[in-house]
Image (cartoon, grey):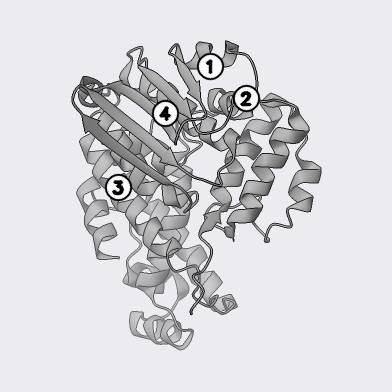
Amino acid sequence: MRKEPAPPAFSDFILLLISAAPKLGLPLEAVLRDAALPPGALSQRGVPIPLSAARYVWSSAERVSGDPVLGLHVAETLEVGTLDVVDYLSRSSASFGAALSRFIRFAPLFADSGVLSLHADGGHARFRHVAPSGVPAVSELIAGMTVLRARAFSGEYVRPLTVRFRHQRRCGAGAYERIFDAPVEFGAACDELVFRREHLEMPFRSADPGLCEILEELAQLRLQQQSRVDAPPPAAPSGFVDEVRHVLRECIAEGNPNIDQVAERMGVSSRTLQRQLREQGTSHRALLAETRAALVDQYLSSSTPTRHALAAGLGYASARSVSRALRRR
């Protein structure tokens, strides 16, 4: 019988903890060294890592910190944008329910483990996290961030009816009361936040339909790229390809990265540039898409990214052009 591959995690899952470490005084150096993570995992998003390594880092951080509610404290510490495109996509959603649905859809950008779901029955809405081998700190991180982000994006004091965790209670009620202001149960069948059903329709004051459309296409693209983690790594780029990337960045900044402009900058004809790139196993279109994707983080790191700034920063004529281009990729 063919053995199924282990579900992957990605460096983003570890970077959340690393970003919170300075504020919380977490001593992570030994933990990260012992985890033997792949190169780039401590500084780059989207680097695939074993799920076992990700769980080791989180559980070890919980142990060395001596903090039984580390996940809640990390949730309080993380600023909007730490979740990268998922944060901005949630913030630009029309409502709490729409944001939850998108978070569920794109959670695999961090780790493909456990199952997130949203159910509405009667007057209740239930946001569930089922992870039989999960780490308590991660369960509490997800619950804490869900409530805190809902309050920040809606401007309303969102209060769950009930909070449930699969793990057992490990400390007093103080931190749970401060964040959730709701009854908290332990030893449940799964992690669960129960809200009034009407909360799903609660509008977000940060809603931006145009930006949301662009970011949803971008998140879907990243999900497709990460699904190909088993593909062989690309060959090392040549100096010529690196030069084209450099020129593309300059042309994007000036608003005209088409092939004629790039070829003119490099002192060759468009046809010659196409041929030389083809010999290197790539193309102007592929390098332009790759370069734009690399620039996205720069514009999402703004505290108030807009669809117009994103379009201009990536060298598109309009926000609608960004969305169309992402769908084609």
Spot occupied by residue 180 in the image (x, y as percentages of width and height): 46, 16
**Mark 1 vs 2, N-terminal side:** 2
Judged left or right of residue 123, residue 269 is right
Q: Which of the labelled discs sits on residue 69, or is there none?
A: 2
- Of mark 4 and mark 3, the one earlier in the sequence is 4
Q: Residues within 10 Å of mark 4 (few under 14, many from 20)?
A: some
| Marked residue nearer the N-terminal end (4 or 1) | 4
Say which element carries label 4: helix
Q: Which residue is mark 1?
A: 176
Disc 4 or disc 1, which is closer to the eye? 1
Q: Secondary structure at mark 3?
A: helix
Gap in angstroms between the C-alphas marked 1 and 3: 32 Å
Q: Alpha-carbon distance for marks 4 and 3?
A: 19 Å
Name which of mark 2 and mark 4 comes first in the sequence: 2
Tell me where residue 85 sits by quadrant: top left
Is the C-beta separation of discs 1 and 2 under 8 Å? yes
Question: Which is more N-terminal, label 3 or label 1?
Answer: 1
Dot 1 falls on a residue whose secondary structure is helix
Q: Which residue carries the number 3 mark?
A: 216
Callouts 4 and 3 close, C-beta under 8 Å = no
Amino acid on which disc 3 is placed: Glu
Looking at the picture, which amino acid does disc 2 mark? Val
Q: Can residue 309 be seen in the rendering of this structure?
A: no
Whether the residues at callouts 2 and 4 have beta carbons within 8 Å, the answer is no
Q: CA distance from mark 4 to mark 1?
A: 14 Å
Q: In this rendering, is residue 303 above or below 115?
A: above
Question: In the image, residue 286 lies at what x, y percent?
Answer: 39, 71
Q: Which residue is mark 4?
A: 146
